[in-house]
Image (tube, grey):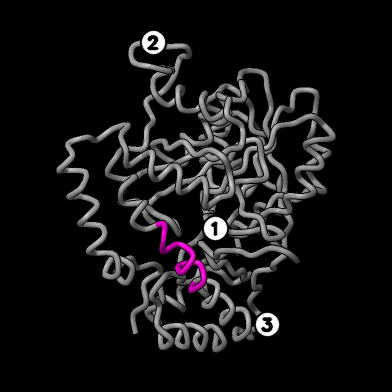
Amino acid sequence: MNIPFVSFKPLEKELDTYIHAAFERVYTNSWYIDGNEGKVFEEAFAEYCGTRYCVGCGNGLDALILSLKALKISTGDEVLVPSNTYIATALAVTYVGAKPVFVEPDIRTYNIDPVNIIEKITSKTKAIIPVHLYGQPCDMEKIVDIAQKYNLYVIEDCAQAHGATYNGQKVGSFSNIAGFSFYPGKNLGALGDAGAIVTNDEKLAKMVRALGNYGSDYKYHHIYKGNNSRLDELQAAFLSAKLPLLDRINIERRSIAKRYMNEIKNTKLILPYVLDGVEPVWHIFSIRSVNRDELAAYLFEAGIGTNKHYPIPIHLQEAYKELNIGQGALPIAEQISATQLSLPMYYGMTEEQINYIIDKLNAF
């Protein structure tokens, strides 16, 4: 049996008519930027997230950059980020001139550990970016409490967590502002690059919209030195076609994850840990093993696709060598990077495929 790490085919088959209709609608209207499709999606996604405002942009990285700019975080400031996230979280901080300060995660959940946040706060710290890694929400109550105590902004990185909840409340609605990615592989994915921010702050929403439109609040009038980062009409229309299916996609992912959690019995493997009150959406189902590379090769031979998220932590990437953070300085991030393996997890997986994966893992 051959099981890919991810497949879009089952979802594409179900959405085929709606996607073609979305394309025809945009193409017929001959309006491709800043039109009605974007407005419709932004309103729907804000409502879905439980926030007052949504502003579309070019991608998830831009969503974070625009959020930081709107909060006026810049040169000389420090922003706390997880030590084991995807590099985009740190890049956003760098691109506004600030310094990313890495905070170690909880080894159980892989999310930023509130216990480790306080010791990293200095007089230069301006914000915390909790990443809901792999689609599992961070411990937002504790993070928000810390931010309020130390007068810090909170920017949620929701790139992998569309629809995930913490104590019944959707991620993206806990912070000053939150960024989403709609990269095609996300639970809610476009057919190209796309992103958005959500917030309850009208002023921030207006600033982000202007900043992503060359700093312009209306045509040829520029109040900021902005970027060109807008959600185009075609991607907005595709996202509007897929959004009504998001809850069903997440329910199916939860069902697959439940089977993995309940039926993988191999004591050589470390399964995910879920905090009380948290409802992940399982963008990635991540396990760990000290024999990770051997396990990956074994599964490859069995026809099962896997992935490693992320095999080199940010502080050891050449791109961040100027920070002079050496091997061993962030041991939890390094441990996760060396042992993490992602299993197939996508809408449309069959019972036969799930059974086969579980059987092979238990036999390892």
Residue 189, by quadrant, is bottom left
Q: Amino acid at mark 2?
A: His
The answer to which of marks 2 and 1 sits earlier in the sequence is 1
Q: Is residue 114 above or below residue 134?
A: above
Image x and y of residue 4, in percent: 36, 72
User: Mark 1 packing: few (<14 Cα in 10 Å), some, or many (20+)?
Assistant: many
Is 7 left or right of 159, judged from the image as shown?
A: left
Residue in the image at 41% along x and 88% along y: 352
Number of numbered callouts drawn = 3
Residue in the image at 79% along x and 29% along y: 151
Q: Amino acid at mark 1?
A: Gly
Rendered image: mark on residue 263: none
Rendered image: mark on residue 221: 2
**Which region is colored magenta?**
243-252
Image x and y of residue 7, in percent: 34, 68
Image x and y of residue 1, in percent: 34, 85
Of 13 and 273, which appears nearest the observer? Answer: 13
Judging from the image, what secondary structure is the residue with disc 1 in? Answer: loop
Residue in the image at 51% along x and 29% along y: 66
Residue position for label 3: 267
User: Mark 2 packing: few (<14 Cα in 10 Å), some, or many (20+)?
Assistant: few
Residue position for label 1: 163
Residue in the image at 59% along x and 56% along y: 337
